[in-house]
Image: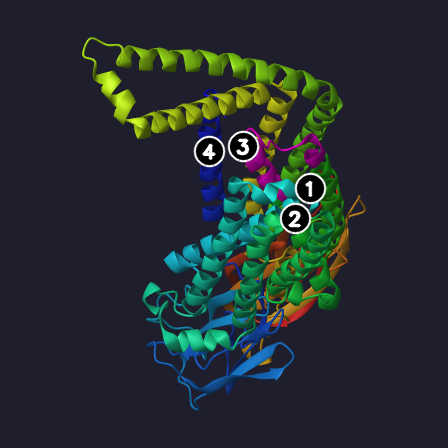
Amino acid sequence: MNRTTAPRLRTLLLLLLAVTGALLAGASPASAHAALTGSDPGQGVVAGTAPTQVSLTFSEKVAMGDDSVRVLDPQGKPVQTGSPANVSGTTYAVKLKSGLAKGTYTVTYQVVSADSHPVAGAYTFSVGAPSRTVVTGTAPAAGGGAVGGLYAFGRYVSYAGFIVLAGGAAFVLACWQRGAGVRAVQRLVVGGWIALTAATLWLLLLRGSYTTTGKFADVFDLDLLGQVLQTKTGAALVSRLLLLAAAALFVAVLFGTYTRREDATEKRDLTFGLAVGGVVVAAGLATSWAMAEHASTGLQPGLAMPVDVVHLLAVAAWLGGLTALLTALYRAPAEHPVEAAAVRRFSRLAFGSVLALVATGVYQSWRQLGSWSAFTETRYGQLLLAKIALVAVLVGIAGLSRRWTGRLTDRSADAEPARTDRVPAATTTGGGAEENAGGGGMEGKAGGPTGGGGAEGTAGEPGDARRAAQLARQRAAVDTARQKRLRDADENRFGLRRSVLAEAGVALVLLAVTTALTQTEPGRTEQEAKAAASSPAGSGTSAASGALTLDMPFDTGGTDGKGVVRVDLDPARVGGNTMHVYVRRPNGRAFDVPEVKISFTLEAQKIGPLPVNPDHITTGHWSASGVQLPVAGDWKIAVTVRTSDIDQATVSKNAQIG
């Protein structure tokens, strides 16, 4: 690396680390991959009679402990009895004490989703009438705080370690077998193994606190560790550690016996054996992620898990091989530079990996998003768009690297003989000058006025031997430096080094975005949770509450003008009411129309229309509080929906209120 490249490299790496840190900080480690889709009693419901139990319905199965669901009275005292139990499918219930007093109750839940991520939240319901409550900080911070940040960092390091370990070994075996004897490449692959092993142990220790209390003091709680070992994630982490023991043996053979094997037939057989064993170990390590995360739950897990394994292996072959190539280009000894043929072989390997990534990525995107709108309406979709953009940039830079590789290959046959002719001449000249200089120095010593050199020449033969050895080392260093300068002077090799460095920089950011994706709620789940939350039926509204729900289809006549508007009035009685309005498309997805207006008319007594302009809350959801209805009767509820500047429609229904 020349003097101008080194500062640029350091600056680029510092910038990439800063960007990576920002991405990891921006990714919420507490993102829930299972979502609460229903509850009974529901959010904000005022029940006429005290319920006997509280039930929660999630988007997927979850793991619960004895205190996973708590119900607190207005004074903050727990009123649940026993442990929560699975009553059907993804619905879980906890029994309540009998004779609950009137007032507002708080439900808190803290569970672990099927894809290993903590899910926490809280809501309130009331018995008889709402009241003040002393409950504060009701939503547990599972998966957040310092422990959540450390856990996220551990995940990033584990992915990076796997990529460097598997991809670096693949680069050596498939592209540059001479690299097995290069010290820098050895340190890179061994460093990947150390990083993955340390990160796995770190995640195993943090797991208990990460999914429960979120306190750093509980990291070394042996009881929590024992509970973790009984979970799917704990089993996956332990399996990864066992596979890493096999990986250590693989690395020892690759950089030990393999480098010493000289017989061509024996080396070919050992290469085949290492390739088969390496693929098996790498696939097993990749499976330890697939069996405990997104791929293991949701749609088609039987297909999604193998696809996820292929995806991880392709990422490792591409990005890990790229890291090994970068190391070889910058750190390989001058006498053993990475050959153009090795770069060409890696180019083919990377191209195949990109094809595998595209195929598996398309399937994963469909599985996790489910709709085009999820790309822009969900955090998962937005991160996925960022990942796609980074992959496109990476492929573009890789195209430049292929061009440099082609030029390097075309010129290598002609350039090498000329270089061979030049190097010995330069070496001889340099060595001769150095020898003359060295000889002159010794003569000066021997023939000096003091005459000390003569005595040393007679009795100091060991000193002459040391000088000769030192001179030989100096000649070797000069020859190596000259060869490195000649190698680096090749503009094609220099261009390849810079383009590969740029690829590695983008790959660092890509890995950070990918890590954030694994900790973010899939778009499909997020949209389903929003739809369920906006549905009164989904929240388990009790008939005893007296709430009123009306569904009214509309058609404004314009493009994309059809849908259904739902009006939820609670408690639907004389006096103050809370109103929620939900607008959906015919397929059930939230519909964010420009404007919604409501009016109430009691035609029998010529009251109204009483206009209500609800506030926009979120996509497809409007709300208004304090809706005053003066008398009981058969009220006409009219809703005006505007879907564009000129397209609007008014639909209405009558309902008995009070």
Residue 443 x/y as whole percent: 32, 12
**Between marks 2 and 1, how big is the CA–CA gap?**
8 Å
Q: Which residue is mark 4?
A: 15
- Kindly state the secondary structure of the residue where label 4 is placed: helix
Task: Compare marks 2 and 4 and give the one earlier in the sequence.
Answer: 4
**Between marks 2 and 4, how big is the CA–CA gap?**
29 Å
Amino acid type, callout 1: Cys
Q: Which residue is mark 3?
A: 333
Q: Residue at x 60, y 41 (%)?
A: 179
Magenta span of residues: 321-343
Q: Which mark is residue 175?
A: 1
Q: Is residue 640 visible?
A: no
Q: Is residue 206 left or right of residue 339?
A: left
Q: Is residue 346 left or right of residue 78?
A: right
Task: Compare marks 2 and 1 and give the one earlier in the sequence.
Answer: 2
Task: Compare marks 3 and 4 and give the one earlier in the sequence.
Answer: 4
Please say if the residues under marks 2 and 1 sit with CB atoms less than 8 Å apart.
Answer: yes
Q: Residue at x 67, y 58 (%)?
A: 524
Label 4 crowd (10 A; few <14 / some 14-19 / many >=20): few
Q: Which residue is mark 2?
A: 170
Q: Is residue 469 above or below residue 612?
A: above
**Between marks 3 and 4, how big is the CA–CA gap?**
28 Å
Tell me which corner region of the image, top left, top right, bottom left or bottom right, holds residue 206: bottom left
Task: Compare marks 4 and 1 and give the one earlier in the sequence.
Answer: 4
